[in-house]
């Protein structure tokens, strides 16, 4: 199983994006987590298609676009055209999640489904054969800097069990509150893609990348032993 750090662009320094992206790539980072918020599904507005188009020119990273947007199917073609490699939508935001996930796949990128902390895994179980990734929110979506909700690890473990029992091949991503004292819990529960914002971008970016990459590698070896 691949265990990867997924730095969240929401916490980056927007005056230094190109420089910071080059630092991510130099450190061996593969994924860039990009939060698109509409101010409707979540109580915040972030950035959209023009920004993704612009940063695509500066980066060869895998663009992991997390759409915290109501009825995201309206924007899928434009998000893919802007440079997304993967699109994750919230089951709570989609009138027809099956159609939305199929549309993402038709557009030629990876498809992910996300659940908020209060949403049980049972809601997305019928969709698991349509996705490449499940994103379990470990904070309420829409705002950075919240504390990790440890009880969300139960949903991660449930998803890992379902994947094993039914032969699904999706990644499990967690987003929210991932720091020094929570990353082990998330990985032990079964997550393999770790979204981190302030933990990566606050302070010395290069040192943070070295530290968290080494920590993930260390925990992964323990889990696989």
Image: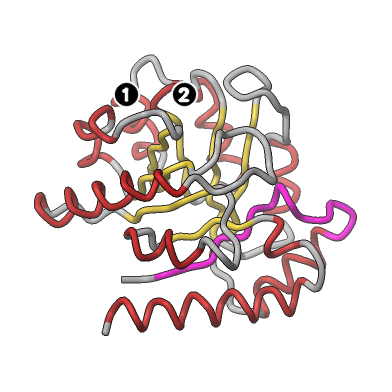
Q: Residue 48's spot in the image, x, y percent?
A: 69, 34
Q: Earlier in the sequence, mark 2 or mark 1?
A: 2
Question: Relative to 102, is 64 above or below?
Answer: below
Q: Which residues are magenta?
A: 3-16
Q: Residue 165's spot in the image, x, y percent?
A: 9, 53
Q: Are marks 2 and 1 in contact (CB under 8 Å)?
A: yes
Classify the position of the N terminus by image quarter.
bottom left
The residue at 82%/68% (across/down) is 203
Check residue 214 for magenta coloring. Answer: no
Check residue 6 for magenta coloring. Answer: yes
The residue at 38%/59% (across/down) is 191
Q: Which of the 4 image quarters holds residue 208?
A: bottom right
The residue at 50%/60% (across/down) is 194
Residue in front for this viewpoint, 101 or 115: 115
Q: Secondary structure at mark 2?
A: helix
Q: Which of the 4 image quarters holds residue 171?
A: bottom left
Residue in front for this viewpoint, 202 or 27: 202
**Residue position marked by numbered label 1 in the rendering:** 99
**Residue position marked by numbered label 2 in the rendering:** 73
Q: Residue 218's spot in the image, x, y percent?
A: 45, 83
Residue in front for this viewpoint, 210 or 151: 151
Residue count near mark 2 (Cα–Cα under 10 Å), binned few <14, some 14–19, many ≥20: some
Name, please, the residue furthest toward the left. Answer: 165
Is residue 209 rendered to the left or right of residue 188?
Answer: right
The residue at 52%/49% (across/down) is 175
Res 32 label: none
Residue count near mark 1 (Cα–Cα under 10 Å), binned few <14, some 14–19, many ≥20: few
Q: How far separated are the C-alphas under marks 2 and 1?
A: 8 Å
Name, please, the residue furthest toward the right. Answer: 15
Q: Residue 188's spot in the image, x, y percent?
A: 35, 65
């Amino acid at each position: 199983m691949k265990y990867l750090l997924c730095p969240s662009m929401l916490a980056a320094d927007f005056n230094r994006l190109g420089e910071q992206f080059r630092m991510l790539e130099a450190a061996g980072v593969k994924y860039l987590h990009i939060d698109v918020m509409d101010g409707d599904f979540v109580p915040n507005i972030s950035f959209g298609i023009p920004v993704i188009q612009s940063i695509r020119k500066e980066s060869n990273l895998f663009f992991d676009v997390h759409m915290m947007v109501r009825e995201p199917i309206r924007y899928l073609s434009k998000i893919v055209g802007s440079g997304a490699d993967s699109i994750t939508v919230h089951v709570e935001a989609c009138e027809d999640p099956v159609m939305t996930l199929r549309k993402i796949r038709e557009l030629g990128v990876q498809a992910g489904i996300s659940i908020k902390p209060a949403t049980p895994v049972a809601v997305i179980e019928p969709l698991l054969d349509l996705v490449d990734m499940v994103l379990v929110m470990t904070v309420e979506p829409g705002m950075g800097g919240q504390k990790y909700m440890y009880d969300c690890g139960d949903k991660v473990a449930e998803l890992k069990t379902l994947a094993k029992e039914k032969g699904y091949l999706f990644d499990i991503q967690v987003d929210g509150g991932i720091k020094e004292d929570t990353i082990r819990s998330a990985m032990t529960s079964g997550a393999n893609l770790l979204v981190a914002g302030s933990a990566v971008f606050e302070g010395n970016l290069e040192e943070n990348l070295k530290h968290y990459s080494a920590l993930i590698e260390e925990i992964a070896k323990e889990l696989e032993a």
